[in-house]
Each structure stands twice: as C-alpha cells, then as structure tokens.
Image (tube, rainbow, N blue to C red):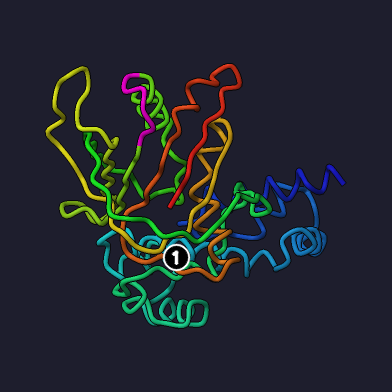
Amino acid sequence: MMMKKAIIISVLEQIEKNLEERIDIEKLVVITGYSRRSLQDFFKEKCGVSIGKYIRQRKLSRSATLLKLTSQSVTDIAFRMGFDSVQSYSREFKKTFGVNPNNYRKADFWDLRNLRPPYWLDCDEHYQFEICQLTSKEIFGFQTSHQIATNDLPKKASPIKWKIIHETLRTWGENVYCLSSFKPDNTKDQVIAVSSFFGMEHNSVDGGKIPMSRVIKCGKYAKFHFVGHKEQYQQFSNTIYMCILPKLNLIRREGEDIEYFHLASVQKQQSNESIVDLY
C-alpha cells in the first residue's frame, strides 16, 4: 500500500513539474517501472480519474488562474498550457467551467468550483467557519508590493510575509490586519502584482502618528479561523480557495483578502503557532 502511494506521489510530482509541457504517459510508465494499465489502475484508485483526465483538469485549472490573475492573452495561455489551438482550448474550458475563457476573465467574481487542486493541498483539512457581517473600519499602517512569477501556480504563502507579520505583532503589541490584493501586472503579462497593507486600529506608534491608512469595507464575509505553524499557514489560503469554498458552494467576489493576526500568536511562541482569521 505504501509502495502504491509513493508511486502515485511520484507521478503527481512529475505532472506538476511538467504541467506546461506535453506530458507523455509513456514517460511516466518508464519512471515508475509499471505497465501502462497497472499505473492507470493505481492512479484512478487514488485520484478518482484517469491520468489523462487529471492532466487536463490541472492544465485547465492553472489556465483559469492565469486568466483571473494575469494580463496574458487567451491565445498565449492556450499555447502555454499545451493546447493545439485556441478553439480546442476554449471548447475544453467551457466544458469544465461552463463559460468561455473571455467571459471567465471578465466576471466580477471568481467561481472556483471545478478547479482541480494540486496534489500537495490537503482537501480534507477543516477550519472553523462562519458567515459574518463586518462594519467599515479604518486601519493605520504600511504597505508592501511585489511581483510573483506564474510558472508554478498556485503558490504557497511567502515565508517573508510570515516574518513581517510576526515582527509587526511584536513591535506594535497589537492585533494586526493584513489586506492583500492579487492583480494582473500592468507592465508584464506573465507576473502577478501583489499588494499587502499591514495595519492596526490605532494610528500611532511610540507617540508618533502613522500617516498611511486604509478602510476595510463593510459587508457580509465568510470567516475562516486558523491555528497552526508556518508550514501549515503557507497552504491555508490555497486550501480555502481551491478546496473549501467549492465544497461550501461559495463564490469569491471582487475585493481584498482580509487577514486578522492575533497578538496571542507571538505571546505563545513556545508552541510556534499563529492564530489568524481570514475573511
């Protein structure tokens, strides 16, 4: 049983590494040393679909992310993901997501149903969840911006963000908000522009005023509660978006991710865990 699991993980790793290439099932057969039929049987038992269908689902899922988060053209995305033509790509895309790529991109919401998550996400993970109403709130702090490449989406959360959050919690001695946006970059079509605002409810630190502020919009939000280590946090938002929202039949509207990091995170460093609410 352990041998089968190791074989399937090896196959999944190869698929993920070569997702933007033409993946030859015969090469997977050579790598594993099993016959094509045995490998297909093992794979279907573990993943619920054939190898070919899984590859197609992962390619379409990555292309959906590229449509929403980059300015790369539909044509470029189609060929980047190994489709023979824009027409065949659009046809397969519509079969999976119910709309053509252009309409998927233009929608002012993100329907994440039918995405196939990467193998390393634990879709059996559960987080405390509730629908809540947030009031409008001004927070004060600082902003960071950077770009991320799109060659291996979805990305795990950056360890740099974790470091910034924990340093800020210790410096301010307050709970910290992080408002993050992920948008197409205006200058490069194959990168994502990421902006994060770190803030608190008070507008002064050590007697000095904080000049920059942002407003959290009021409205109805889905709230997920996280308690865990850095490695678990790196997969937290991806698990919410690619596994849990689809299970709950929830669709993400436009807007920023709002994270609320509790000061208790740095007060219990002996366990090296953090407490976070994601809206």
> On the image, which quarter does residue 168 sit in?
top left
**Residue 13 place in picture, x, y as percent:** 61, 46
> On the image, which quarter does residue 80 sit in?
bottom left
Image check: 275 left or right of 216? Answer: right
Where is mark 1, residue-wise?
82
Residue 226 within the segment the image draws in magenta: no
**Residue 112 place in picture, x, y as percent:** 48, 67
> On the image, which quarter does residue 171 sit in?
top left
* 209 to 28, vertically: above or below: above
Of residues 241 and 202, the one drawn nearer to the viewer in this rendering: 202
**Badge 1: residue crowd in 10 Å (few <14, some 14–19, many ≥20):** some
Q: Residue furthest right?
A: 1
What type is the residue that disc 1 sits on?
Gly
Residue 174 within the segment the image draws in magenta: yes
The residue segment tinted magenta is 171-176
Of residues 57 and 142, the one drawn nearer to the viewer in this rendering: 142
